[in-house]
């Protein structure tokens, strides 16, 4: 986390330009490395990329990309709330699983039958956020009370959360729908299925309704980070924890609040599919929380950057199907994604360095020009 | 070497204060004896022979080795001032390259190739963190995203679509050794006598059919301790982790020593990975590491960034990890007696020392253990699998104070800064 966005309002081209070139350069590097991997296995990279592009721009695929991107975006925002203050919530994966499971189990329990559909959707969202925050609070308390690194504790809580859900689902609350093989939390009544959005033309497919919530969430994230006192404290702690504490920020409370918000947002990650597609919780959910970290890194915790990152990731994930048809191992996508993340973080770091150096040079020139003048003034006054 | 003596004084100074309470050999022996008696009691009280059976102990040893190697990996990197959360990724590289190398060239070359795979992972992490100054955690996370992709792709192009997630069986393994005569303990173990059978079980588990790689891995712990604390090279590695500016002012090439630390770290994690795919099992499977890189890191933190401590941590976590393999539901249930007693004892101890938060939380956990023990007969399998992760959390929560990481651990360093 460097000082890239401090002066967002005073746009400094010398500093901004490297920041914009960085992700593009990183993508080019990632494409080059994936091409080498493809060439090693005797495949033509250009045809592969071309087919991916053609496939990914079909209307049906656009819908799938936006669906995938909504989930990833929510996960990325959850991660970014922590990243902004240098807090690493690697536990979005576990928080999202536990949250979706409890929300789904409660909403489809028999004593909830009286509830109207709309209200039930609200209930699911609220319960998921509370459970997500509660699961994250364990890590937050361990950090503030006992000094346990949140990286380790959230990773352990991911594993524990997944196993607790497996246990409760298979031994206690899970039901097997007629004709199904696996246990689920029970299909939600049809009136609480979230309707899709017909925003992509040229296809019958609808984008998951939660897409809208993801967009609102992005705006809320921007507002909280940039326009509230809490957001200011959060960023201040991220840039310089000592200065923040010295200026009156309560470090412990910041850790707990940031972690709770992060966990609450993480609770939403599995809801797009649960409310709009599967209508129940199954063990098939998962993996998005970890990928969300990559998207947050890619988008540099910026609301728009992360949106672009989520769409790129959605594109890569959904267009890998076409590669298999071409006889190209679709696993190449995983390499592409991994290399992209690594080269993007390196590129951002380099860009920040180049930007800083350019700024220093300009300041140096400016002060050098000012220095002789100042010296003359001193001479005259003698 | 005058530079090194000055350096040692500089590096040792902050460490000197809290380091007066190191355990003597007799204390360690007492703790081991106490653990044995405790486990024997659990064995008798709850009739759970797999708490100390040779099979369980052997499984525990095999589970502890990869954790210990990951912990050593963490130690090498963090002693050089670089946090390596990418251990998991380097371990994944180790599992695949180890299995592939063993299939192609036999077990010993396979071992080497796996170590190299991990070392390359470490090199990538070093390039990102040391040369380019990327945040260590971020680079580590990127590493754990990249590594599974790389091995999945390699797996697919070597073994075809059926082999994308697992390798063919690795037939050729590194030989196993037994201490002569140790197998005769088997009779003693089967008698189920208090303490005697338990000691027989533990000895047989530790000394019978031990892979040469296990021996090598266990030897790496004293070797690491010796290199890091008794050689000039180790002193330099530690000095760049404590105070890189001071090290630089004495003429050390800080970048180079950080590179050494992180690459060795990757190699250790890689060996841990090979161990999983060619010694613990005889096949590479996707997701085989199962977060062991992170548990290893936790073992190192528990061990206060020291080889001996991390070995204890790895043994503890390895033991809980291995329980699931052999009638874990009964064993974990029986162990709740011991866990509860330990937690309650800790509660009393901390209460006397006026440490309320810890006292109350360990008392609550202790009571909960007994409630759980008396309310069910078996612990559900999924929760037995969760036992090592829960142990890590509880142990770190109750012990995380009074730790001293290397002073410049995780901090970015720029030459001349």
Image (cartoon, helix red, strand yellow):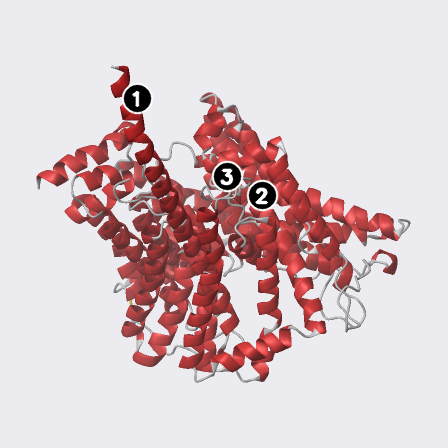
Q: Give the camera-side residue of B285 and A327.
A: A327
| B48 sits left or right of B90 in the view | right
Question: Callout 1 environment at 10 Å: few (<14), some (14 to 19), or many (20+)?
Answer: few
Image mark 3: chain? A
Residue A6, numbered label: 3
Question: Callout 2 environment at 10 Å: few (<14), some (14 to 19), or many (20+)?
Answer: many
Relative to A317, say whether B144 is above or below.
above
1 or 2: tag closer to the N-terminus: 2
Which label sits in the foreground, 1 or 2? 1
Marker count (numbered):
3
Helix, strand or loop under label 2: helix
- Residue A299: give x, y in percent of width and height: 54, 53
| Distance of label 1 from label 2 (alpha carbons) | 50 Å
Relative to A170, say whether B245 is above or below.
above
Q: On the rendered image, what quadrant is the C terminus of chain B found in?
A: top left
2 or 3: tag closer to the N-terminus: 3
Q: On the rendered image, what quadrant is the N terminus of chain B found in?
A: top left
Residue beneath disc 2: A81
Q: Are marks 1 and 2 on the same chain?
A: yes
Helix, strand or loop under label 1: helix
- Residue B163: give x, y in percent of width and height: 49, 79
The answer to whether residue B199 is seen in the rendering is: yes
Relative to B328, say whether B110 is above or below.
below
Question: Callout 3 environment at 10 Å: few (<14), some (14 to 19), or many (20+)?
Answer: few
Which label sits in the foreground, 2 or 3? 3
Image mark 1: chain? A
- Say which residue appears at 50% left-offset and 34% top-offset: A237
């Amino acid at each position: 986390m460097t000082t890239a966005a401090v002066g967002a309002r005073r746009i400094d081209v010398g500093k901004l330009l490297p920041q914009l070139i960085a992700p593009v350069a990183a993508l080019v590097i990632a494409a080059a490395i994936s091409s080498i991997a493809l060439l090693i296995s005797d495949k033509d990279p250009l045809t592969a990329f071309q087919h991916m592009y053609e496939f990914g721009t079909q209307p049906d695929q656009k819908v799938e990309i936006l669906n995938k991107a909504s989930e990833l975006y929510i996960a990325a925002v959850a991660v970014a709330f922590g990243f902004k203050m240098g807090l690493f919530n690697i536990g979005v994966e576990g928080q999202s699983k536990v949250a979706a499971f409890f929300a789904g189990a409660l909403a489809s329990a028999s004593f909830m039958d009286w509830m109207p559909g709309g209200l039930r959707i609200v209930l699911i969202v609220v319960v998921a956020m509370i459970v997500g925050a509660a699961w994250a609070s364990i890590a937050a308390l361990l950090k503030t009370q006992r000094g346990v690194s949140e990286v380790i504790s959230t990773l352990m809580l991911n594993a524990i959360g997944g196993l607790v859900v497996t246990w409760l689902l298979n031994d206690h609350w899970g039901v097997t729908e007629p004709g199904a093989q696996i246990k689920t939390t029970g299909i939600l009544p049809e009136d609480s299925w979230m309707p899709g959005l017909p925003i992509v033309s040229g296809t019958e497919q609808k984008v998951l309704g939660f897409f809208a919530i993801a967009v609102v969430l992005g705006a809320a994230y921007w507002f909280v980070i940039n326009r509230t006192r809490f957001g200011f404290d959060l960023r201040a702690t991220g840039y310089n924890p000592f200065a923040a504490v010295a200026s009156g920020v309560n470090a412990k409370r910041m850790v707990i609040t940031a972690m709770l918000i992060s966990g609450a947002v993480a609770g939403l990650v599995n809801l797009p599919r649960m409310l709009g597609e599967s209508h129940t919780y199954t063990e098939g959910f998962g993996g998005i929380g970890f990928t969300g970290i990559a998207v947050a890194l890619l988008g540099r915790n910026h609301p728009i950057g992360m949106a672009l990152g989520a769409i790129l990731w959605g594109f890569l994930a959904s267009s890998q199907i076409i590669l298999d048809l071409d006889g190209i191992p679709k696993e190449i996508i995983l390499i592409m994604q991994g290399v992209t993340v690594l080269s993007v973080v390196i590129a951002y770091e380099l860009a920040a360095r180049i930007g800083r150096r350019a700024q220093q040079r300009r300041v140096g020139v400016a002060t050098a020009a000012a220095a002789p003048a100042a010296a003359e003034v001193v001479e005259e006054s003698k | 070497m005058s530079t090194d003596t000055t350096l040692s004084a500089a590096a040792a100074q902050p460490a000197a204060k809290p380091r007066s309470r190191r355990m003597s050999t007799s204390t360690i022996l007492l703790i081991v004896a106490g653990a044995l008696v405790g486990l024997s009691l659990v064995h008798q009280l709850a009739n759970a022979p797999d708490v100390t059976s040779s099979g369980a102990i052997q499984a525990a040893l095999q589970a502890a080795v990869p954790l210990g190697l990951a912990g050593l990996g963490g130690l090498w990197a963090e002693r050089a001032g670089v946090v390596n959360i990418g251990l998991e990724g380097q371990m994944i590289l180790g599992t695949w390259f180890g299995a592939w190398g063993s299939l192609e060239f036999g077990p010993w070359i396979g071992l080497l190739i796996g170590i190299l795979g991990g070392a390359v992972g470490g090199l990538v992490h070093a390039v990102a963190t040391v040369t380019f100054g990327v945040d260590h955690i971020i680079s580590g996370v990127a590493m754990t995203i990249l590594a599974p992709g790389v091995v999945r792709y390699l797996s697919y192009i070597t073994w075809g679509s059926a082999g994308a997630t697992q390798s063919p069986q690795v037939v050729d393994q590194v030989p196993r050794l037994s201490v002569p005569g140790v197998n005769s303990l088997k009779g003693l173990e089967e008698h189920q006598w208090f303490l005697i059978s338990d000691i027989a079980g533990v000895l047989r588990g530790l000394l019978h059919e031990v892979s040469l790689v296990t021996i090598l891995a266990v030897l790496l712990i004293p070797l690491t301790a010796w290199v890091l604390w008794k050689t000039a090279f180790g002193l330099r590695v530690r000095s760049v982790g404590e105070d890189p500016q001071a090290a630089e002012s004495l003429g050390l090439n800080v970048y180079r020593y950080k590179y050494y630390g992180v690459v060795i770290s990757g190699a250790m994690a890689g060996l841990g990975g090979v161990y999983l795919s060619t010694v613990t099992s005889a096949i590479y499977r996707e997701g085989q590491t199962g977060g062991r890189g992170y548990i290893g890191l936790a073992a190192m933190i528990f061990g206060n960034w020291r080889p001996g401590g991390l070995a204890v941590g790895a043994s503890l976590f390895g033991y809980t990890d291995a329980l699931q393999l052999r009638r874990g539901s009964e064993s974990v249930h029986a162990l709740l007696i011991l866990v509860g007693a330990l937690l309650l004892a800790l509660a009393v101890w901390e209460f006397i020392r006026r440490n309320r938060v810890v006292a109350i939380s360990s008392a609550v956990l202790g009571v909960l253990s007994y409630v759980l023990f008396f309310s069910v007969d078996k612990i559900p399998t999924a929760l037995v699998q969760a036992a090592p992760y829960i142990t890590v959390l509880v142990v770190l929560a109750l012990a995380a104070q009074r730790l001293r990481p290397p002073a410049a651990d995780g901090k970015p360093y720029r030459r001349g800064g």
